[in-house]
Amino acid sequence: MFDRHVTLESLITDSVAKKHLPKAGYAHVVSATEYAFELAVKRKVCVDLATKATLLHDIGHTNWERHGEWDFESYNEFDIHTIKGAERAHELLILKGEDLGKAREIALAILFHSGSSPVSKNVKLTPLQKLVSDADDMDEQEDGAHHRVKIDFGEALQRIRRLDMLVHPYRKDCNENCENCDSLK
């Protein structure tokens, strides 16, 4: 249906994503991706990159629960999910056949999506990176509850398929050369 294009569906159904995204919560990553689509259209940022980066933004999460409660102290001090996530997402995108420039831009957006990450300190975010961070924040709930909202994989997949249909028309003007893309500047 989408020629050789790497779709959101092809990402969420991959074994790497199915192993790691449940730790972040399908409800959270799908809701944040829906917000990213809306923000990208409004801000004129590449919709394809924004939705892929947001779908994968928490693929580096580790379970920080201790005795059934989220351990914020350990999470805030030791978490490196942005670093692990950028690496995992980059590798997944390359294996799926994503354009190398797009894979890099998506990985960098994941790397810088969280203000709590030590790598994000004193970094001026690009519009794409800011958008992913904002979409993530739009779904945030107190005490990390957004990571514990449950939806089954079937519902997540249905919503992702809908997003793929919405994203597709925005790709018509995409020249696949992210280096020269006005929506990244």
Image (tube, rainbow, N blue to C red):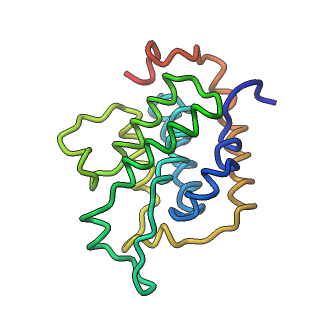
User: On the picture, is 146 further left or further right than 7?
Assistant: left
Q: Residue at horizontal 59%, vertical 18%?
A: 174
Q: Residue at horizontal 37%, vertical 21%?
A: 185
Q: Residue at horizontal 50%, vertical 37%?
A: 90
Could you say where residue 132 lies in the image, as x and y percent from the top left?
A: 43, 43
Q: Quadrant of residue 175?
A: top right
* Farthest bottom residue in view: 67
Residue 125, above or below 22: above
Please give the count of numbered marks on the rendered protein.
0
User: On the picture, is 118 further left or further right than 21?
Assistant: left
* Farthest right residue in view: 1
Could you say where residue 71 lies in the image, as x and y percent from the top left?
A: 34, 76
Q: Quadrant of residue 128?
A: top left
Q: Residue at horizontal 40%, vertical 38%?
A: 109
Could you say where residue 30 lies in the image, as x and y percent from the top left?
A: 59, 54
Residue 67, above or below 144: below
Could you say where residue 65 lies in the image, as x and y percent from the top left?
A: 42, 77
